[in-house]
């Protein structure tokens, strides 16, 4: 009977092992499904944000063109251009609101961008390096030999590195 008890214990342990493995496989499958659903949601959000970015860029381009025309405009044409710029700003705020930015924050961000674009100084731009943002210098670019070139007129500058 000892061999029979050993066999029964072995069968019981084998059944427990099979149940545990099948449970682990099911759990892994459920987690994989959840990850796929999350990945699909992230992709949808990224596409939506890209679309909002493209629309904002198009509105910004229109706004910049009108602002350039505004500098030389007088009389009723000036009022018309100012009104068009105001309407484009309202559109920008609405787009940012649809993207999830509160109206107050959207207005402040657009005011900051408009203020920096109205000055002669170039806007400060940053690029992402991992978790840090590094400031880019817009005044000069460097060629392969390290010579600095002014972006505005293309003249070389002294290389002081």
Image (cartoon, rainbow, N blue to C red):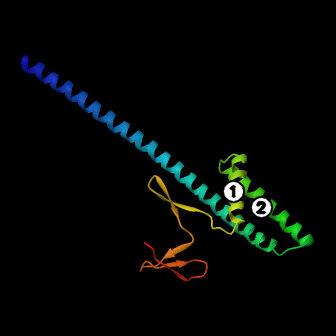
Which numbered disc, 2 or 1, marks the residue closer to the eye? Answer: 1
Q: Residue furthest top?
A: 1
- Quarter of the image for residue 161 reads bottom left
Q: Residue at x 57, y 77 (%)?
A: 151
Residue 70 position in % (x across, y down): 81, 71
**Alpha-carbon neighbours of circle 2 within 10 Å: few (<14), some, or many (≥20)?**
some
Contact between marks 2 and 1 (CB within 8 A): the answer is no
Residue 10 position in % (x across, y down): 15, 26
Q: Is residue 11 left or right of residue 110?
A: left
Q: Residue furthest left?
A: 2
Task: Please identify the quadrant where the N terminus is shown.
Answer: top left
The front one of 84 and 110 is 110
**Alpha-carbon neighbours of circle 1 within 10 Å: few (<14), some, or many (≥20)?**
few
**Label 2, label 1: how many angstroms apart (C-alpha)?**
16 Å
Residue 57 position in % (x across, y down): 66, 64
- Quarter of the image for residue 140 reads bottom right
Q: Residue at x 87, y 70 (%)?
A: 78
Q: Mark 1 — residue? A: 112
- Mark 2 and mark 1 lie on one chain; the one further toward the N terminus is 2
Residue 79 position in % (x across, y down): 89, 66
The front one of 27 and 11 is 27
Q: Is residue 40 left or right of residue 58?
A: left
Q: Mark 2 — residue? A: 88
Q: How many marks?
A: 2
Q: Residue at x 84, y 68 (%)?
A: 81
- Quarter of the image for residue 82 reads bottom right
The front one of 150 and 83 is 150
Q: Residue at x 46, y 47 (%)?
A: 36
Secondary structure, mark 2, is helix
């Amino acid at each position: 009977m000892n061999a029979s008890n050993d066999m029964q214990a072995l069968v019981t342990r084998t059944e427990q092992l099979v149940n545990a493995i099948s449970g682990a496989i099911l759990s892994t499958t459920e987690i994989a499904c959840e990850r796929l659903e999350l990945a699909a949601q992230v992709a949808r959000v990224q596409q939506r944000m890209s679309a909002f970015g493209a629309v904002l860029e198009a509105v910004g381009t229109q706004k910049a063109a009108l602002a350039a025309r505004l500098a030389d405009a007088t009389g009723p044409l000036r009022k018309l251009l100012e009104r068009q710029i105001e309407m484009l700003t309202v559109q920008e705020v609405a787009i940012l609101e649809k993207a999830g930015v509160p109206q107050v924050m959207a207005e402040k961000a657009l005011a900051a961008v408009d203020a920096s674009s109205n000055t002669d100084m170039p806007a400060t731009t940053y690029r992402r390096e991992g978790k840090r943002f590094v400031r880019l210098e817009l005044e000069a670019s460097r060629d392969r030999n390290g010579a600095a070139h002014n972006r505005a007129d293309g003249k070389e500058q002294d290389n002081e590195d």
